[in-house]
Amino acid sequence: MRKPTSTLFTKILSWFFLNLLLVLAALTLFFAFQPQVDLHDFFGQQGSDRLRAAGMLIAHDLNQAQPEKWTEILARHGAIHGVDFVLVSRDRVLFSPTLKTLPKEVMLRSQDALRHKGRRKIMRQLLQKNTEVNKKCLSEVEEDCAKSILLPKRYGRRTHLIMRSKEPTRYWFGTKIPLVTGTEEHRPMMPSLLLAVSDSITGNGFFFDPLPWMVVAASVLLISVLLWIPLVRNITKPLVRMTRAAEEIAKGNFNVSINEPRADEIGRLARTINNMTARLADFVKGQKRFLGDVAHELGSPVARIQFGLGVLEQRLEGGNQERVRDVMEDVEEMSKLIRELLAFSRAEMHSGAVELEHILLLPVVEAAVRREGTPTVQIDVQIDPEISALASADLLTRALANVLRNAIKYAGEAGPILVAAQEKEDQVILTIKDSGPGVAEEYLDRLFDPFFRPEPSRNRDSGGAGLGMAIVKTCVAACKGTVSARNREPNGFAVTIRLGC
């Protein structure tokens, strides 16, 4: 059984997902090492906008209340947005419902952000000091020109604070908010920085909501898979069908045809296989017809030779008579070969015209046992008299006779030969087992090929032309069945015939 990872479909999909991972890795490396791309702006803009909007509402509520109530107001807004809000003034006055002090690096960055001048004010000062740039950037439309030349990096496009602190790890977003202090008559502005704090990099969705990005990524992946799977199926399904057809052809079944009405390489391959199958079928059929014709033509001369040698043997005496007997044995072997060739050819040539019927299995097996059995070999038959199979009685008897003949010849002295049958689902399974030496594993696949004799367990010296098992396969195939062979453990050999019922 093939492993799932060995299929072409799995390999192509694996390459597809690997390609996605490589693209993702390339984008990550690009953003990580590309100085022109600011990841804070790329991912932090959403958090900055949300913090700015929340800051306006918080500033309004803080301006309407006394400083003693600010901590409570920050706690209420923090519960709404799922983060902790902290307010830091330029004088390092801290308002927080959860923190008593800020980490040193956060306080330094907060104070640095509060000391920065506005962008337009800095631009105005820089343009006044640099007349050359002032000539190039004469209008506000060209403000980006001077901004790119003169503005320091820390006064770039970022208008919010983003940082991470350690021990414990926390993520901070900050923005300036307008606050006023003092009495109704005199309420000066107090520069303040509103910080949103969270243990999560997403701030529970306040800094950055990953759901839209996850939906986009899942949609891209789903669309890609929906586009790729039909493409892969369109390639692999025909290959699977062609593989099965090739396996049938390798078994000697040429009654297969591949219908792939395509104009691409797969369609051309299917048509080539069909043409090859047709030519192989014609070649094999012609070869078998030739063997049958040769065997038929040789039958009469060999019979005349046998008759003549018999007459000659009666007229000779002494050593000459022995030499004639030796020649008669050789002629008898030739006659047996011719009979096997005729049986093989007839079974192949007439397999398509066989009429199948339901027959009781036990009488057929007993007939084969009577034909091939000998007094010195024990053959045990264990078959229910009620078991029937869809087959031809003559062909099945011939197949069983050949199997039993081989078992008696090569394993008759090793122990009893068992013939058993059982019904399983819609099949009848007939098994012939012996206790002989078996066949080398590398020869099992070729055992049913014509003229094949496995070595060294069975060879020419022990008799046979290598057609016995080929005749078995041909007869069983004519009965719409299958035949297989295997070695038994620790020793022995078994042939299994499967027929319809």
Image (spheres, helix red, strand yellow):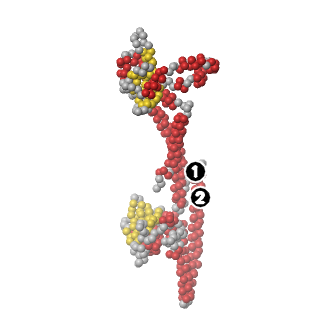
Identify residue type, mark 2: Met
Q: Please indicate, yes or no, whether residue 494 appears anywhere in the rendered image.
A: no
Tell me residue 112's x, y (percent). Answer: 48, 23
Q: Nearer the viewer, residue 71 or 345?
A: 71
Secondary-structure class at tag 1: helix
* Residue 285 picture quarter: bottom right
* Residue 431 picture quarter: bottom left
Instruction: Name the disc covering residue 276, or none.
Output: 2
- Name the quadrant of the C terminus: bottom left
Q: Earlier in the sequence, mark 1 or mark 2?
A: 1
Q: Are marks 1 and 2 in contact (CB under 8 Å)?
A: no
Q: Nearer the viewer, residue 198 or 235?
A: 198
Secondary-structure class at tag 2: helix
In the rendered view, would you say 47 is above or below 299? Answer: above
Q: Left or right of 90: which side holds 297?
A: right
Q: Image point 45% across, 25% down: which residue?
A: 108
Identify residue type, mark 1: Ile
Q: CA distance from mark 1 to mark 2?
A: 15 Å
Residue at which label 1 appears: 266
Tell me residue 353's x, y (percent). Answer: 51, 64
Q: Nearer the viewer, residue 355 or 293?
A: 293
Q: Left or right of 323: which side holds 46?
A: left
Instruction: Please give the count of numbered marks on the rendered protein.
Output: 2
